[in-house]
Image (cartoon, rainbow, N blue to C red):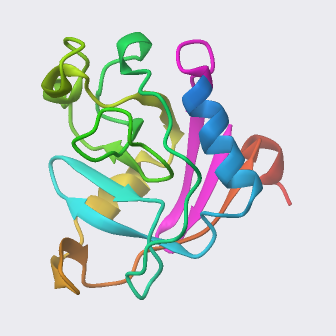
Amino acid sequence: MILIKTSKGDITIQLDTANTPHTVNNFLEYIRQGFYNDTIFHRVIDGFMIQGGGLTASMENKATNAPIKNEAKSAKPNKRGTIAMARTMDPHSATSQFFINVADNAFLNYTSEQPQGFGYCVFGEVTEGMDVVDAIAKVKTGQHMNHGDVPVEEITIFEMIEDGSKSKSK
């Protein structure tokens, strides 16, 4: 379990180590480094997803580790409440950024080994705090420093805690 402490409330994620072990290990490595602390949800599209995990409040990209292999072929589908890796047009370009689906987004699923069909790797799902995810999805957004769909109200990821089920009682 991962506890994501945000300025809008807490979100608990159950990771899918069985289907996406490399993606989960990559995510955990960033958590253990404290990488996500004080980053923001920088791209929010209501009815689609909320994205974070790589930019500071000043819209600066944080330095990341090397990209990982896309495991979308063995991953669960991009359904409401799942967390997946964000990437560029290169199917194997995911580093630290992730998104949480606020709708069923089947068009993001793996369909083939072709660049257009590789999909986005789901590596877990929200078990608590979907109300927080939905609240984030509803915030007003706009343009900010050459980025679109940026929340007008800053939404900070204060920290991520591994095994958040135990840490919640602290």
- Residue 127 in the image: state x and y as whole percent: 53, 35
Whether residue 39 sits left or right of residue 117 in the image: it is: right
Residue at figure coordinates x 29%, y 27% from the top left:
78
Task: Determine the residue positioned at 21% across, 37% down.
Answer: 103
Residue at 53% across / 13% down in the picture? 19
Quadrant housing residue 117? top left
| Rendered residue at 58%/76% (across/down) | 38
**What span is colored magenta in the figure?**
1-21
Q: Position of residue 126 (x, y in %)?
A: 48, 38
Image quarter in which the N terminus is found = top right
Residue 39 sits above or below residue 31 on the image: below
Whether residue 35 is situated above or below residue 79 in the rendered picture: below
Picture quadrant where residue 139 is located: bottom left
62 inside magenta stretch: no
> Relative to residue 9, is residue 69 depicted above or below?
above
Q: Which of 89 and 131 lies nearest the eye of the viewer?
A: 89
Q: Residue 113, percent across and down?
A: 24, 13
- Horizontal arrangement in the rendering, residue 120 relative to residue 38 (left or right): left
Is 59 situated left or right of 7 in this image? left
Q: Quadrant of residue 58?
A: bottom left
Q: Is residue 12 magenta?
A: yes
Question: How many tags in the picture?
Answer: 0
Quadrant where the image shows the C terminus = bottom right
**Which sits in the foreground, 53 or 162?**
53
